[in-house]
Amino acid sequence: MIKQKLDYIHDNPVAAGFITQATQWKYSSARNIARVDPAIEIFRMKVVLPTVVGTRSRRATSNTIRIVKTNSPITKARELFNSLTKHKIGNLIDDGNGVLRANMGNGNYINYRQSSASTSNFPATISLDFRAAGIWTKVRNVKFIAP
C-alpha cells in the first residue's frame, strides 16, 4: 500500500507532463530510492515524543518528522515550500511570528518557519497539515539542517 502511494506521488509530475521519468524531478524522493544523485538527502528517524492521555503521561514513538540535510537549509526549505504551495488558495498568511501559512483548501495547510520563529535548533521547518483531508491523522514536519 505504501509503495503504491509513493509510486502515485512520484508519478504525478510525469502524468502532468513536466518530466518523462520520476527521477528527473529535482526534489523527489524517487531520486533517493533509485540512488540517483539526489538534490537533498532524506533521512527517516523515529522520534520519541511525550504525549498526554487524560491525566496519565506516556511516551509514544512517532514517525511524523523527516530530517533533510542540505548545504543551504533555509534556501532549500523555501524552494520546497514555494513548490508545494504553488496551487494555494489566496495569499500566504503571515501569522506575525515568522510563520508563513498556505491555505491548500478544505482546512488543509502547509506552514513554513525559520529557526527565528521556532524553539528548535533547525534552520527551517515545513509542516504539512492534511488532517482535514483524512490523509494523515497527525501533522508531518520536514526539518532542514546543514550536514
Image (cartoon, grey):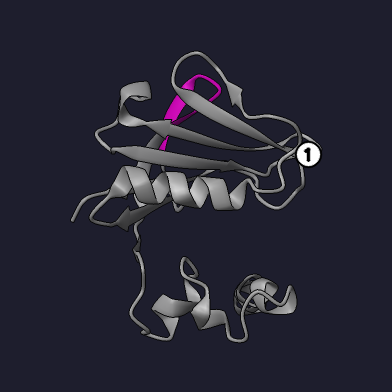
The part of the image, by quadrant, that contains residue 12 is: bottom right
Secondary structure under the numbered disc 1 in the rendered image: strand
SS majority, magenta: strand
Q: How many callouts does the rendering have?
A: 1
Q: Which amino acid does label 1 sit on?
A: Gly
In the image, residue 56 sits, relative to residue 63, either above or below, namely above
Pointer 1: what residue? 105
Q: Which residue is drawn at 43% across and 86% down?
A: 34
In the rendered image, residue 115, in percent from the top left (x then y), is placed at 31, 30
Residue 61 visible in the picture: no
In the rendered image, residue 87, in percent from the top left (x then y), is placed at 72, 47
Q: Which residue is drawn at 36% across and 31% down?
A: 114
The outermost residue toward the front is: 18
Q: Which quadrant is home to the N terminus?
A: bottom right
Q: How crowded is mark 1: few (under 14 residues within 10 Å), some or many (20 or more)?
A: some
* Observer-nearest of 56 and 143: 143
In the rendered image, residue 71, in percent from the top left (x then y), is placed at 23, 55
Residue 99 visible in the picture: yes
Q: Which residue is drawn at 48% across and 25% down?
A: 99
The part of the image, by quadrant, that contains residue 68 is: bottom left
Q: Which residue is drawn at 50% across and 69% down?
A: 28
Magenta residues span 51-59
The part of the image, by quadrant, that contains residue 17 is: bottom right
In the image, residue 122 sits, relative to residue 68, either above or below, namely above
In magenta segment, residue 114: no
The outermost residue toward the top is: 96
In the rendered image, residue 122, in percent from the top left (x then y), is placed at 28, 38
The outermost residue toward the right is: 106
* Observer-nearest of 64 and 129: 129
Q: Which quadrant is home to the C terminus?
A: bottom left
